[in-house]
Amino acid sequence: MKKQLKELTIKDNFMFGAVMTMPENCKDFLEMVLQTKLSEVVVSKEKSMIYHPEYKGIRLDVYANDEERTHYNVEMQVSKKPALGRRSRYYQSQIDMELLVSGEEYEELPDTYVIFLCDFDPFGQKKYRYTFSSECKECKESKLQESEQNFHDDYVEKLQRTIREIKRDREMEERFMILEEMLKDERKEGRIEGREEGRAEGARLSLCTILECKGRIPDMFRKQIETEQNLEVLRNWLVLAAKSDTMEAFLAEAESVKGRQCGQKE
């Protein structure tokens, strides 16, 4: 028997979604669950109550983010469903993929929370809240105090004495600080180079996709695309490929485009 709107309660997915798409309601709910104060919460109504076949039917969860760019996905769970942990993993992967497609770098991905509001005890431990997070077991178990404790072993004690002497050595401290600065600069340069290579690889893939719609890419020119490192050349080829009606027309202009670009740099 179908329900009417006036018969719905907060347990019904539609009503829960409708209530939580109001920012003040969603903000109060998140503050209560996470036990923290939020300045502002923005609810995406377009993503919160949609139908999409990839989400296996109607998606009535609430999708929001706060002033720190933390993203939240909230869903009402009335009937007990298996593999809640795997469902949360799926939702988090969807958030990450959407942000990556929009141009985010991996290091810029924000924190995410997937929250299931259940009308049952999902794990049978008689808790009103279960919280899960990723952690490194080894890092958690290995602490500074443990590394310095007395293991009653002559060799370990010898190493510990050496470590204490190194820590007191001003010259070693200076060398460590210099090394840290060098590594910091190296990591920064690596990130810049990585982003440039990522953009170049994306341009190569897009160029090949467009050209393959216009005919077979000659092996010699495909090799040129694969080895081309100049991002501006690849972008100019992309523009030319979009404008060209045929593969022949593109190839007739491609070399001159690269020649002009190299001439400008000289």
Image (tube, rainbow, N blue to C red):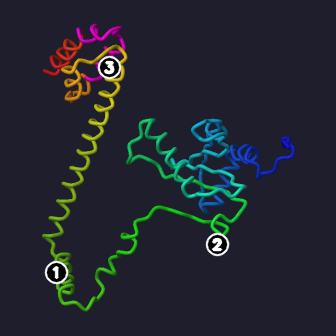
**Where does the image place residue 163, in percent across and percent down from the top left?**
19, 78
Mark positioned earlier in the residue sequence (1 or 3)? 1
What whole-number distance in Å separates the C-alpha atoms at marks 1 and 2? 48 Å
Q: Image quadrant for the C terminus?
A: top left
Quarter assignment of residue 79: bottom right
Kind of residue sitting beneath label 3: Leu
Q: Nearer the viewer, mark 1 or mark 3?
A: 3
Read off the magenta span.
234-252
Residue at 72 percent across and 55 percent down: it is 78
Q: Image quadrant for the N terminus?
A: top right
**Where does the image place residue 155, in percent across and percent down from the top left?**
17, 86
Residue annotated with mark 3: 238
Tell me: 168 left or right of 89: left
Residue annotated with mark 2: 125
- Whether residue 88 is in magenta: the answer is no
User: What secondary structure characterizes most of the magenta part?
Assistant: helix
Mark 1 surroundings: few (<14), some (14-19) or many (≥20) residues within 10 A: few
For the residue labelled by badge 3, is the local secondary structure a helix, a strand or a loop?
helix
Mark positioned earlier in the residue sequence (2 or 3)? 2
Mark 3 surroundings: few (<14), some (14-19) or many (≥20) residues within 10 A: many
Quarter assignment of residue 260: top left
Nearest the viewer among 221 and 65 is 221
Kind of residue sitting beneath label 1: Thr
Residue at 67 percent across and 45 percent down: it is 23
Nearest the viewer among 68 and 51 is 51
Residue annotated with mark 1: 162
The answer to whether the residue labelled 1 contacts the one labelled 2, judged by CB atoms less than 8 Å apart, is no
For the residue labelled by badge 2, is the local secondary structure a helix, a strand or a loop?
loop
**Where does the image place residue 43, in percent across and percent down from the top left?**
63, 43
**Where does the image place residue 237, in percent across and percent down from the top left?**
28, 18
Residue at 67 percent across and 50 percent down: it is 26
